[in-house]
Amino acid sequence: MSKLWQKSSTDTESETAKQVEAFTVGNDYELDQVLVPYDLKASAVHAKALLKAGVLTGSELEKLTGALSDIQQTWEAGEFEITVRDEDMHTAIENYLVEKLGDLGKKIHTGRSRNDQVLTAMRLFEKDQLEMVLEEIKSLAQSLISFGEHHQAVPMPGFTHTRKAMLSSVGLWAGGFAELLIMQMEASEGIRSLVDRSPLGTAAGFGTTFDIDREFEAEELGFSAPLICSTSAQLSRGWVELQFVQYLAGVTSVLNRFASDVIQFSSEAYPWFDLDDVVCTGSSIMPQKKNPDVAELIRGKHATLVGSVSTLQSVIANLGSGYHRDLQLTKEPVLSAVHQTLNILKASQIIVGHMGVNKKEMRSACTKELFAAEAANLLVKNSRVSFRDAYKKIAENPDMVEELTIEKIMKEFTHLGSPGRAGLSELKSRL
């Protein structure tokens, strides 16, 4: 059957027409398989709005929603096909309705456009996936806190400029990553507010003379409210998606740094974390190799999210108001970013669950230079000298550090968020 926009005079069979079709459709018909249930949900709600507007009868609504339900079951069985000739899910769904219901199937498109259709499906997808991402963030933060609690008292060198700096602890190390993830969860309200506005009923971006109850559609779909101006819908396409993917990249940027630490601190030079074989691979030529591939791919996959951000920024740059075909290209970066983010979060949880601490090696790595700053602090406390004078004295007499031990230093850390009191219980309460 024809695409939704085709006229009877449209050339579809020439070699040029087929080349243009392949170029303009791209892989949209494949990407849309993920979005089918969201488009079906929006179509069913739109049909209810058409009943309220007097376009459909009760009997027609029942037949349409029944056919949409049939498509849902076919899709769940993995048997709903979208071909390049369909172009997208919207055409495939409408063609199915027309084939099953005849002229009634053609009524479903009354008062709407593919522009608000795809926007609505994308926003429903984004709302749904955001909640899935937040659940995975929460699980990972809990895993990191549990890891930190289990190894809370294990001393660990802290670094600045990749050089040994001050005494830290495994509890403090794990807690830092957990807190950043919790902060990302707390920041999600801003992203949720962006994806929680319904574009349905805005049609091509200028409304319609059919009396569509857009507030009803928004409520039925679980949105907090509709976008007010129809023009906002197409202006928001790509703009909201950019901020959504930027949020996801913020999540994975935390795990990019986590993975870098895991790689470094499980190496022969820093043998502090023991990675199970299940999260490592070997070499095809070197029998002794145990490579941290899972952690390395977390870093690499974060780079693909940064690429998705860059794609969205570039695609929507310099576009005027209204719809532009360029905006079709904002779909794939979002779908890819969600997929990669969920994979990265799950992979990070696997690492935390399959990582041990080499206490002996980590303790021996806590050499005396880590205590220099605290030696100066103790002079301030005990001798009532200024910190600057204490700093100079320790710099000129480094042997004074020799009197200190890990146990003595750890006892001195009493404030919240220090090696001796990482604050893991406070982080748990925030979760």
Image (cartoon, grey):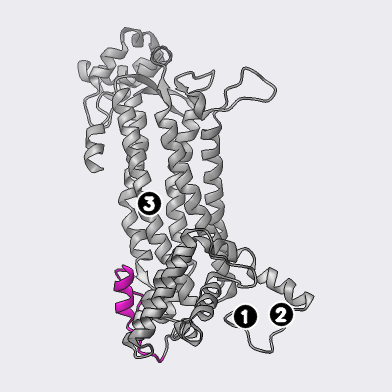
Q: Which mark is residue 2?
A: 1
Q: Pick the residue in front: 17 or 100.
A: 100
> Dot 3 surroundings within 10 Å: few (below 14), some, or many (20 or more)?
some
Q: In which quarter of the image is the C terminus?
A: top left
What residue would you read off at disc 3?
A: 132
Res. 3 image quadrant? bottom right
Q: Earlier in the sequence, mark 1 or mark 2?
A: 1
Q: Are the residues tagged 1 and 2 within 8 Å (C-beta)?
A: yes
Q: Where is residue 297 in the image (x, y as percent from the top left)?
A: 55, 38
Residue type for callout 1 = Ser
In this view, the residue in front, 311 or 378, is 311
Extent of the magenta region: 209-228
- Residue named by callout 2: 12
Q: Tell me if I can see residue 35 in this picture.
A: no
Q: Which mark, residue 350?
A: none
- Identify the secondary structure beneath mark 2: loop
As helix, strand or loop, the secondary structure at mark 3 comes to: helix
Q: In which quarter of the image is the N terminus?
A: bottom right
Badge 2 amino acid: Thr
Q: Give the residue at x 32% y 39%.
A: 179
**Dot 1, how many residues are within 10 Å of its Cα: few (below 14), some (14-19), or many (20+)?**
some
